[in-house]
Image (cartoon, rainbow, N blue to C red):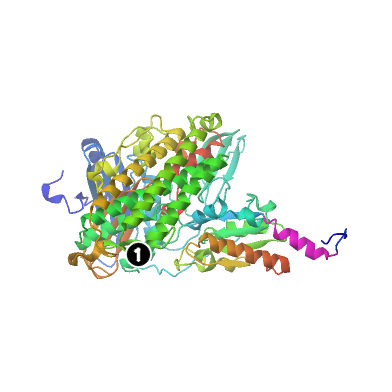
Amino acid sequence: MMKGFEYFTTQKDELLAWARKFSIFPYPFVTACCGMEFMSVASTLYDTDRFGAALPRFSPRQSDLLMVVGTVSHKQAPIVKKIYDQMCSPKWVIAFGACAVSGGVYQNYATLKGLDKIIPVDVYIPGCPPRPETVIDAIIKLQSKIETGVSKNV
Amino acid sequence: MFSESQAVADGHRVLEVAVASDLRSVVRKLKEEFSCDLLLDITALDLLATETKMVMVYHLCSTKHGQRVRVKVPLSSTNNMFMLPSLREEYAAANFLEREVHEMYGVNFENNPDQRNILLYKGFVGYPLRKDFDIAKECPLDLQASPIESSVTLADDEQKMVLNFGPSHPATHGTIHLVLKLEGERIERADVHCGYLHRGFEKECERHNWQNIIPFTDRLNYCSPLINNFAYAEAVEALAGITINERCRYARTLLSECARLCDHLTCIAASLMELGAMTPFLYLMTIRDYFYEHLASLTGARLTHSFVRFGGLKSELSNEWLAKLQEWLCFYEEYIKRVHALVDRNRIFIDRMRNTGVISTADALSLGFTGPLLRSTGFAYDLRKAAPYLAYGELDFEIPVGISGDNYDRYYVRMREMDESVSMIRQCMKKMQAMAVQGLNSVNSDKTYFLPKIPVVSAGEIYKAHEGANGELGFYIVSVGGKIPYKLHVRAPSFVHMGGFHKMIEGDQLADIIATFGTINMIGGECDR
């Protein structure tokens, strides 16, 4: 704001999107190896707090970002779906790691070939497991999606 | 009972039980007369194309005499229905192991009433590890369905509560599902369900060549992938008749201990965080990240290293790398002091950990527990001492043990083991720095160790175990020659520990599950495979 101006104009949606972008409450659905990297991302050296996405809410009802971290097996699928359904709109989904993206190296009877077979996904993070920088990149990408209001989940 | 000729190459004495109904008396004799106190593993071998049809394979161990026994029971049947007696009464560990064999191979166990699926889910059709099962055949669950079959029921007039704990509980690291019967806050009965991370590892191995299985082993116990790498490689090397040189032995020992350090750091950090101690979590994560980065500078990956090659390692450990490692070890010592100061005598911590999740030595042995869990009960059994492999026989180290087998003891055993690991890393480092570095491929540079990527593995069977961070990590491999294994089975410590988890929490308060589950360190990839 310039000196001498005491107000500025914006659109309600834009203001909301801007606020949402910096107050992401993630729900970490940690199943597998990628969880090790998720721990790193959340702690001191990489620190997602810098991006306003640090406070994990361990209740799906309080969170707006579902991070599916690791392999989703057929046994797990109904649980992911239930947690997704329990989240309130607006909500976003990140598929964390090759297994959540496509099943990864496990192309067999036990695993789901990608999280998007059961719920819509906004951002895919490749890697087995992804490096923490890749995750931060994904969070920034998600933030720009939130700002523009484009989401597959409504 | 045994004749001398029965001792085979991998140090096991093999015992064939021709009539399945004799199994229990044979095993009881082994237990009583040969003091085989640990039932390590049960698996089956599918030979449906041959006369024998199916062979049951049991691995037992006597911690007293250091002897290992493999009991084999050939089963024959006309319509592929197999039946043999259960060992539930002899060893409590048999329950989970038999349930796994039942769902994977379709073998039935008499007098074991519990034949529910454990790794697979309710309604799964087929037996995945039979040779005629198509690996790509999926059997997806209805998204509204419950994947498990609970054995906890309430009578009409019972004033108690049934509570589902997990499979996505915020305060457990690992996907585990407990169905609990509660009397107030006290757990009366617990029904443990795992398998939420079953990824078909063993079936997947049957269609990949020896070399390509290495990345899969990384993803078993993903807290300490290097130990999995080395245990698997040693089993294959023994089958293929490959030996490794002295420098490689030391390098593998050093890296194994680095992996154990990272595993214990993760376990302690996560269990402390789950109890609400955020500061030590951040300290421990910081050290772990420095170790990850340092390992990544060597192997190319922070977590999934795939660093082993048959007969050697992917690359040489340079003296600069070792010198830098020394710096990180000093850093570790400084940080771990702070954790000790914050946690050890903390009133809240002691109240949560002391006398919770208690297990006696006798129960632990009967349940097949190994590793820090068994040692926390005061039983000093460690493969690195009991059957030294790699360079452990030449190192000077102690086995830390607990007293009462509770959560506090398990925490402390792990903390002490990390100190021992650091001392072992230093000893290996000293030894390696005194050796000549022979260029990038020095481990392989000696012509005799330069091997084709896919080794020629002769027909045979082998069980090789390393002391993993959680306990005995064994690979049972059957080869018929050729480039791919006929069967590869993992003796996963986490899975066996989960079979005894109910025993540790029954009678405790609901909130004690968090502390107990944390110190068991169940790792999904290894438990569910």
The secondary element bearing badge 1 is classed as helix
Does the segment drawn in magenta span residue A17? yes
Q: Name the residue that disc number 1 marks.
A: B213
Query: Which quarter of the rendered picture does the C terminus of chain B lie within?
Result: bottom left
In this view, the residue in front, A117 or B471, is B471
Task: Please indicate whether residue B41 sits to the left or right of residue B355 in the image.
Answer: left
Magenta part of the protein: which range? Answer: A9-24
For mark 1, does the 10 Å Cα neighbourhood hold few (<14), some (14 to 19), or many (20 or more) residues? many
Query: Which quarter of the rendered picture does the N terminus of chain B lie within?
Result: top left
Where is residue B197 drawn, in percent x and y?
Answer: 48, 56
Three-letter code, disc 1: Ile
Does the segment drawn in magenta span residue B501? no
Q: Residue visible at 47% across and 29% down?
A: B355
Vertical order, B104 against B331 (above or below): below
Vertical order, B193 against B514 (above or below): below
Where is residue B237 drawn, in percent x and y?
Answer: 24, 60
